[in-house]
Amino acid sequence: MKRTVSIIGLMVFGFAVSAPCQQDSGVSNAQGESASQQQSPAQNNPSPLSTPPITGPLQAGPPITFDAGPLGKLNLNGVLSGFGLVQDNHVSGDSTGQAALSNGQVFVQKADGWWQFYVQAGAYNIQPLGLPFLPTGKQVDNLYSPVPVAYLKIVPAKNTSIQIGELPTLMGQEYTFDFQNMNIERGLLWNQENAINRGIQVNQAFGKFAASLSWNDGYYSNRYSWLSGSLTYARGPHSLVFVGMGNLGHTAFQTAATPVQNNSVMYAAEYTYTKGNWIVQPYYQYSNVPTDPAIGIAKGASTQAGAVLLSRTLGHGFSLAGRGEYISSSGSATDQAVNLLYGPGSAAWSLTATPTFQRQRFFVRGDVSFVRATSISPGDAFGSNGTEQNQTRGILEVGFLF
């Protein structure tokens, strides 16, 4: 696997070096597209594509477009990046310092016509807050394979589409891969959500509303018993999303990609404000894993959580993002409730700050984060013995988006 990751990284680096330069970044996706549309027709510079979505402050470049014969016009983008990490109170088996290839991915897609497709392939490292470091090769092997996202998209009408394949979840304000997010690390709320699911999804837009409904395998379980849906209202700089998902059956099947939460239901209300130099995203999340002794859940538990994500563009390629969040879980060790956090009945809060600089394809950014866990169960928190309540991290990431 290490050799495969190295080869993928070299391939992506080659694409990055040969890719045409984009305009100087530091504005939101909507602003970037608007600026591109205002250029003279003679320049004919393509705009960045909407897939994969990037919240900001990082900005993707225009795609490399080529003719693929019977497949028509295809678009190519990618990302190459690596990070170094330092932390205190690491768990047993982890260490104070770590380094890894965080992204070595290419995105190939057909984005027009009645049939389209999207393929995302390569190496990735998904580093969430409050969880141990895992090498990139092991993540690719144990999570979503070297092709984490791939789907066919049918567009039977202007405002209707159907996607079939390996799809990003509808849940949450943070995406799976770090280049898509304001912060390098995913948050405590993201740790409860699914990331990639396999199935079919129908999307419909009508006026200021958009809706999606998906039949899928939840937390990458390969058991197709999940129903997910979202409803979005967007007006000007404001958007409001209600999301719900749940398993209509239960299974004892678990892997690194399929935790006990695969038996849960989850709901979220998400708001986004995007205007000028600001992106503001508060959201609320609730989840519940019900009691089911038949699959080893002697006592169920639930979580309630809230978070606020902020990003501010400062100019000259600089920006600053931040995240604050709180999550609590129900139950107790005495009633043998399922552990959804740092022990049954535990809670946690976190703060993260991420300064970023991007110049054309190149970017460098850093995370400074702090997690505080409360009401922990010994052995389930931080430190070599799992008894420490705090963890502080610093991460530096350097890379190219093309």
Image: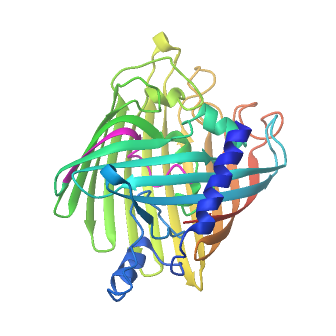
Pick the quarter of the image with the C terminus: bottom right
Q: Is residue 88 left or right of residue 53?
A: right
Q: Position of residue 381 (x, y in %)?
A: 72, 38
Q: Quadrant of residue 318?
A: bottom right
166, above or below 279, in the image: above
Specify the color scheme. Answer: rainbow
Q: Nearer the viewer, residue 333 or 296?
A: 296
272, above or below 264, in the image: below
Q: Is residue 146 left or right of residue 216?
A: right
Q: Is residue 55 left or right of residue 211?
A: right
Query: Which residue is at 64% across, 67% downward?
Result: 354
Query: Which residue is at 54% across, 79% downward?
Result: 313
Q: Can residue 348 be seen at all in this image of the molecule?
A: yes
Q: How many marks?
A: 0
Q: Position of residue 8 (x, y in %)?
A: 64, 48
Asked if the magenta segment contains residue 5, the reply would be no
Q: Residue furthest top?
A: 294
348, above or below 181, in the image: above
Pick the quarter of the image with the N terminus: top right
Q: Position of residue 247 (x, y in %)?
A: 37, 28
Query: Which residue is at 59% across, 20% downward?
Result: 336
225, above or below 210, in the image: above
Range shown magenta? 160-177
Q: Nearer the viewer, residue 113 or 318?
A: 113
